[in-house]
Amino acid sequence: MKDFAVIFDMDGVLIDSNPYHKKALIQFCQSHGYNLTEEELKARIYGRTNKDWITNLFNGEVTGEELKRYADEKEALFRQLYEGFVEPVTGLETFLQMLESQDITRAIATSAPRANVDFTLQQTGMGKFFTTILDDSNVEHGKPDPEIYLKTASAIHYDPENCVVIEDSLSGVMSAKQAGAKVIGITTTHSKDELSSTDLVIDDFTALNIEVIESIF
């Protein structure tokens, strides 16, 4: 069996959280006087890091202190809306148990703040499967920059070429590929066609096993 590690993005991979992030973003914008259309939300807000979309929303007129306060406000709103509704993506726990039983190294690499990571793992009970977690505080450059995946591979002592990254976003896929990892796309956020640059596309974790992963190397 090939020696490889599996690195998981969090939002859209461990949990299908993006609908709740969108709700939080819309409510945040409205509370600050921005009633944006869906087209404006797509163009200015969705899919961006907190730093990017907050700066964009307020036309660049935010201090570092304001940026942190706004980001904390939006993420707290997200957790408030999502609490009690959080469920792991179908098949995730069984897949993680299989990796654990084979002593396959697992890690989380996310652009989310640590408060969201802790919230997710507490709500799902999946924390027991991960000892290595990198979040937004561990990187200077967000996805699609490869920094998060290069640093995660280094933290678990694997070459990126021997890592499989599971991603839902196009920027995340680009980040992982630029790091040199194999990439499995999951269709919680984008369609199979949109994820065509990945090495494999799945709808959830039910059909994913070690043999399938080995086949992409």
Image (cartoon, grey):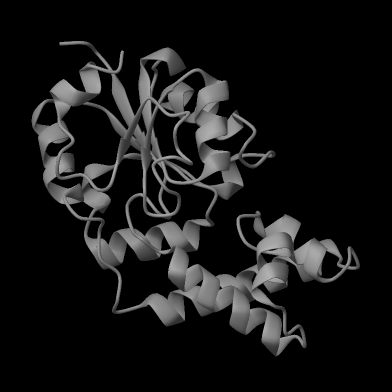
Q: Position of residue 205 (x, y in %)?
A: 21, 44
Residue 59 placed where, x, y %? 88, 67
Please report the residue visible at 43 percent of the width from the left and 81 percent of the height from the top: 81
In the image, is residue 176 above or below residue 53?
above
Question: Residue, x 28% and y 67% (percent of image)?
Answer: 123
Residue 143: x and y in percent read 61, 40
In the picture, measured across the screen, residue 121 lies left or right of residue 116, that is: left
Seen in the picture, residue 149 relative to 85 is either above or below; the reply is above
Q: Where does the N terminus fall, quadrant-wise?
A: top left
Q: Is residue 159 visible?
A: no
| Quarter where residue 41 is shown | bottom right
Q: Residue at x 68, y 69 (%)?
A: 39
Q: Position of residue 36 (x, y in %)?
A: 72, 79
Q: Is residue 101 visible?
A: yes
Displayed quadrant of residue 216: top left
Residue 67, located in which quarter of the rendered image? Answer: bottom right
Give the side of residue 150 with respect to residue 40, left or right. left
Locate the C terminus and report the quarter of the image it occupies. Answer: top left
Which residue is found at the position 57% from the left and 23% from the top?
178
Count of numbered badges drawn on the protein: 0
